[in-house]
Amino acid sequence: MNNRNPLPWLASLALFALCATGCAVGPDYRRPPLPEAKAYTRAPIAAAPAGESEAQHLDRGAKVPKPWWQAFGSPTIDALVEHAFRQNPGLDAARAALRRAEANRAAQYGSYLPAVQADYSASRQREAVGLISPTLESGKARYTLHTAQLSIAYAPDVFGLNRRAVESLAAQEAAQRFERDAAQTTLAANVVCAAIEIASLEAQRRARQAALAAAHEASAQVLRQLAAGFASALDLAAQEAAAAQMDAAIHPLEKQLEQTRNLLAALIGEPPEALDIHIDLDALTLPTHLPLSLPSALIETRPDVRAAEAEVQAASADVGLAIANRLPQFTITAAHGGSATRLSRLFGDGHIFWSLLGGLTQPIFDFGALKHRQQAAEAALEQAIAQYRQTVLSAFQNVADSLYALDADAKSLKATERLEAAAKKTRDLSQIQLEAGDINRLTLLVAEQAYQEARLARIEAKASRFISAAALHQSLGGGLDDRTGD
């Protein structure tokens, strides 16, 4: 070996160390077994009864379209969702968490390679005259010492400690990416449902106001009949009680409407005073074709399920990390440089130095700390697997609940539409009879109140059907895409 120039030998040693990595200890990740499901419900569910004017069909095996909320045909809802994607603080936090995870994973990759560091120092000093070293140039008491060196440090990944650390951080990064997607999916569904709820509450308020106006007019009519001797005080009291009951029902409705507006404002990242929207429920389009992915595909399309699986992979890698920490750790450190009282002689003959150090560290006695950390990591893996299975089962439940809700909402809407049609027919016939002189106006007003109540029930059923359609899209994963990417 050339004592004056060890760099080629050091480079060869570093290259050998890079290749001297063994297998990674600990379990290699495999997807945990999951319960098999061929269908979401015990019996097939139809989204809407056959022959209905607003029929919905389930496209089995179809994926959630992107962006799915456009199926409601509302530019206002589309704009609200896009605004929420830009302004929602929760989504911004999810993006920041993903960037942090990406940076941590990228930083850990540096452990695969040697760390190279250059150092230079200069010191001005004075030696004691009586103790001046005979090697000191010209016997000067004052001098400046220049030292420069290049050092290399490397820890061969013999048992895969670094590889398991990178695997864990990469899985955590994936989990954060799916958490971001889940935040986007939930946000879009919440915005759509809040907007539909606002449209429903506004329509309900108009129906209740119309019913209240009819009730007040009926009370006035009974009062006139009482004065003429054609009605009793009991009749008047009953009608006034009905009007008061309708009046009392409007105020909770208005409170709910304003609170839903405030919720929507928070979802889109704006203060409550900044939001002033009005959505016509009857102008919304009911999606005619709804996707229904297979249960076997749901674990690939639900971001919360994917995030839970990534947590399992991270926990699996952490077990290997804990095992590797109990095994020997190797280090190689080399340095090459020069030291002189003049810069011009820094790397000259007689001023060169170098060193090579190899080390091995093996924990011997730590009161069981490393063993217990391994046991903790193994328990964390079991916990992550159980949580993953629970997340999958919850995903199946969400889809099943959405399918049953769609079926029930379709039947409920059809029943309330029949009720509204019958009440409207009664009101219209009462109007004809009033014009013919066969009934008094009070009878017409009572029929008007009944019609408005039936209309109110139809509005609630229709809104519920829209919201259930949105819930189905959310339960199927909401369509993973890169809309929230930075």
Image (cartoon, grey):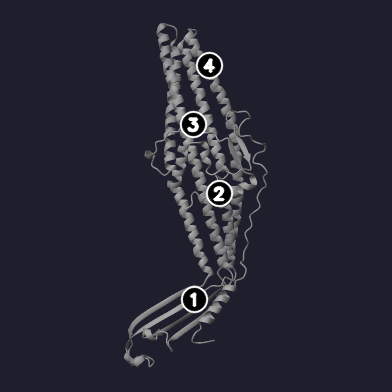
Q: Position of residue 154 (x, y in %)?
A: 52, 73
Q: Amino acid at mark 3?
A: Ala
Amino acid type indicated by mark 1: Ile
| Mark 3 vs mark 1, CA separation in Å | 70 Å
Residue at the location (59% across, 31% down)? 55
Q: Nearer the viewer, residue 33 or 265?
A: 265
Residue 417 rendering spot, x and y as whole percentages: 55, 25
Label placed on residue 303:
2
Badge 2 vs badge 1, beta-carbon distance below 8 Å: no
In the rendered image of this protein, does residue 12 appear above or below residue 108?
A: below
Task: State which tag comes first along the sequence, 3 or 1.
Answer: 1
Cα distance, mark 2 to mark 1?
43 Å
Q: Residue at x 37, y 83 (%)?
A: 343
Depicted 441 relative to depicted 148: above or below: above
Disc 1 element: strand
Residue wearing tag 3? 283
Lower position in the chain sequence, tag 3 or tag 4: 3
In this view, the mark in front (3 or 1): 3
Judge the density around disc 4: few (<14), some (14-19), many (≥20) Cα neighbours within 10 Å. some
Q: Position of residue 398 (x, y in %)?
A: 58, 41
Label 2 or label 4, whichever comes before in sequence order: 2
> Where is residue 442 drawn, in percent x and y?
46, 13
Q: Which mark is residue 152?
A: 1
Q: CA distance from mark 3 to mark 2?
A: 32 Å
N-terminal label among 4 and 1: 1
The residue beneath circle 4 is 426
Front one among 402 and 1: 1
Q: Secondary structure at mark 4?
A: helix
